[in-house]
Image (cartoon, grey):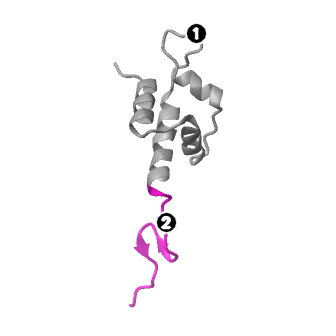
Amino acid sequence: MITNNDILKKLRVALSLRNDDIIEILSLVDFEITKGALGDLFRNEDHPGYVEAGDQILRNFLNGLIIYKRGKLPEPKQGLKDGKNETPKKQ
Protein backbone atom coordinates (compact mmCIF):
# COMPACT_ATOMS: atom_id res chain seq x y z
CA MET A 1 0.00 0.00 0.00
CA ILE A 2 1.23 3.48 -0.83
CA THR A 3 1.83 5.73 2.18
CA ASN A 4 1.57 9.49 2.59
CA ASN A 5 5.37 9.56 2.65
CA ASP A 6 5.46 7.83 -0.75
CA ILE A 7 2.99 10.35 -2.17
CA LEU A 8 5.09 13.26 -0.90
CA LYS A 9 8.26 11.70 -2.34
CA LYS A 10 6.66 11.11 -5.73
CA LEU A 11 5.25 14.65 -5.90
CA ARG A 12 8.61 16.10 -4.90
CA VAL A 13 10.33 14.26 -7.76
CA ALA A 14 7.55 14.84 -10.32
CA LEU A 15 7.45 18.59 -9.64
CA SER A 16 11.24 18.95 -9.15
CA LEU A 17 10.76 20.46 -5.67
CA ARG A 18 13.56 21.03 -3.20
CA ASN A 19 13.03 20.91 0.57
CA ASP A 20 13.00 24.73 0.65
CA ASP A 21 10.18 24.71 -1.89
CA ILE A 22 8.15 22.27 0.20
CA ILE A 23 8.67 24.38 3.32
CA GLU A 24 7.51 27.45 1.37
CA ILE A 25 4.44 25.57 0.07
CA LEU A 26 3.49 24.50 3.60
CA SER A 27 3.98 28.04 4.90
CA LEU A 28 1.37 29.28 2.40
CA VAL A 29 -1.27 27.47 4.47
CA ASP A 30 0.32 28.49 7.81
CA PHE A 31 1.85 25.06 8.45
CA GLU A 32 5.38 25.39 9.75
CA ILE A 33 7.92 22.56 9.52
CA THR A 34 11.68 22.50 9.96
CA LYS A 35 14.17 21.13 7.43
CA GLY A 36 15.07 18.38 9.88
CA ALA A 37 11.48 17.28 10.38
CA LEU A 38 10.92 17.35 6.63
CA GLY A 39 14.02 15.21 6.12
CA ASP A 40 12.63 12.64 8.55
CA LEU A 41 9.60 12.23 6.28
CA PHE A 42 11.79 11.42 3.27
CA ARG A 43 13.95 8.77 4.97
CA ASN A 44 13.65 5.07 4.20
CA GLU A 45 11.10 3.21 6.31
CA ASP A 46 13.79 1.06 7.93
CA HIS A 47 15.84 4.09 9.07
CA PRO A 48 15.64 4.80 12.85
CA GLY A 49 14.84 8.48 12.22
CA TYR A 50 11.92 7.75 9.86
CA VAL A 51 8.66 9.54 10.71
CA GLU A 52 5.34 8.58 9.15
CA ALA A 53 3.57 11.49 7.43
CA GLY A 54 0.05 11.91 8.71
CA ASP A 55 -2.99 12.99 6.77
CA GLN A 56 -2.66 16.54 8.11
CA ILE A 57 0.72 17.20 6.51
CA LEU A 58 -0.34 15.70 3.18
CA ARG A 59 -3.59 17.71 3.20
CA ASN A 60 -1.75 20.93 4.02
CA PHE A 61 0.87 20.23 1.37
CA LEU A 62 -1.77 19.66 -1.31
CA ASN A 63 -3.70 22.81 -0.30
CA GLY A 64 -0.47 24.81 -0.31
CA LEU A 65 0.49 23.36 -3.68
CA ILE A 66 -2.74 24.72 -5.17
CA ILE A 67 -1.87 28.21 -3.91
CA TYR A 68 1.76 27.80 -5.03
CA LYS A 69 0.77 26.86 -8.58
CA ARG A 70 -2.44 28.89 -9.12
CA GLY A 71 -2.24 31.72 -6.62
CA LYS A 72 -4.70 32.73 -3.93
CA LEU A 73 -8.42 32.96 -4.59
CA PRO A 74 -9.63 36.48 -5.32
CA GLU A 75 -11.60 38.23 -2.60
CA PRO A 76 -15.39 37.99 -3.01
CA LYS A 77 -17.15 41.07 -4.35
CA GLN A 78 -18.79 43.46 -1.92
CA GLY A 79 -22.57 43.30 -1.63
CA LEU A 80 -22.79 39.57 -2.14
CA LYS A 81 -23.88 37.28 0.65
CA ASP A 82 -23.95 33.53 0.20
CA GLY A 83 -23.84 34.00 -3.56
CA LYS A 84 -27.04 36.08 -3.63
CA ASN A 85 -27.39 39.72 -4.53
CA GLU A 86 -28.48 41.92 -1.62
CA THR A 87 -30.45 44.45 -3.64
CA PRO A 88 -33.92 45.00 -2.15
CA LYS A 89 -36.90 43.61 -4.03
CA LYS A 90 -39.58 45.94 -5.35
CA GLN A 91 -43.05 45.32 -4.00
Q: Which mark is residue 48?
A: 1
The answer to whether 83 is drawn above or below residue 22 in the figure is below
Position of residue 44 measured from the top left corner of the image (x, y, whole percent): 49, 15
Kindly identify which residue carries mark 2: 74
Q: Of helix, strand and loop, which one carries label 2?
A: loop
Q: Is residue 9 magenta?
A: no
Q: What type is the residue that disc 1 sits on?
A: Pro
Q: What type is the residue that disc 2 sits on?
A: Pro
> Which of the two residues, 91 or 4, is positioned nearer the viewer here?
4
Q: Residue at x 45, y 85 (%)?
A: 88
Please identify the residue farthest to the bottom as the structure is shown: 91
> Which of the two residues, 70 or 30, is positioned nearer the viewer here?
70
Q: Is residue 80 magenta?
A: yes
Relative side of 84 to 21, left or right: left
Position of residue 28 measured from the top left corner of the image (x, y, whole percent): 57, 48
**Foreground label between 2 and 1:** 1
Which quadrant of the figure contains the C terminus? Answer: bottom left
The answer to whether 6 is drawn above or below residue 62 in the figure is above
Q: Residue at x 41, y 69 (%)?
A: 83
Position of residue 43 measured from the top left corner of the image (x, y, whole percent): 52, 19
The residues tagged by marks 2 and 1 sit, at their Cα atoms, a distance apart of 44 Å
Q: Residue at x 47, y 46 (%)?
A: 65
Magenta residues (range): 70-91
Q: Residue at x 46, y 25 (%)?
A: 5
Q: Which mark is residue 57?
A: none
